[in-house]
Image: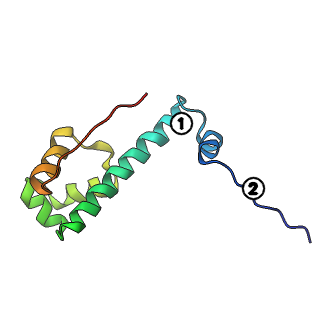
Amino acid sequence: MKTKKNKIVKFGDFLDKEYGKRGTAKREKYEQDYESFKLGVMLQELRKEKKMTQEQLAEKCGTTKNYISRIENDASDIRLSTLLRIIREGLGGNISISITK
């Protein structure tokens, strides 16, 4: 019986193969979805560090539990003003944004 050896591949090479090179529509969609996912996870972790429920956070920053849940699970369609309010008023934090080429 022959065994196939696992070949280690760099993550960037894997992304190029699976989603295309940077700049292609499929790769840009992947990158955008990944950033949204990261944002949702960061907000969820910060909320849990503060020992808050989604409902408590929503009440504190003037939104709904449903909206907080949606952001934590798929932050793709969030308004910047709402995000800032959740972070500042709800979680007592600040946001830092950087742009890379």
Residue shown at 21% from the left, 44% from the top: 95
Quick one: SS at disc 2? loop
Residue 7 is situated, as x and y percent measured from the top left of the image, at 75, 55
Q: Which residue is mark 1?
A: 26
Residue shown at 33% from the left, 57% from the top: 41
> Which amino acid, by three-letter code, is at mark 2?
Lys
Residue shown at 64% from the left, 48% from the top: 10
Query: Is 60 on the left-hand or right-hand side of 5?
Result: left
Residue 40 is situated, as x and y percent measured from the top left of the image, at 31, 54
Q: Is residue 84 above or below residue 69?
A: above
Query: Is 36 on the left-hand or right-hand side of 46?
Result: right
Disc number placed over residue 84 in the picture, else none: none
Quadrant position of residue 50: bottom left
Q: Is residue 71 above or below residue 95?
A: below
Q: Which residue is mark 2?
A: 7
Residue 20 is situated, as x and y percent measured from the top left of the image, at 60, 36
> Which amino acid, by three-letter code, is at mark 1?
Lys
- Labels 1 & 2 near each other (Cβ < 8 A): no
Disc 1/disc 2 C-alpha distance (Å) = 25 Å
Quick one: SS at disc 1? helix
Image quarter (top left, top right, bottom left or bottom right) of the N terminus: bottom right
State the colouring used for the structure image.
rainbow
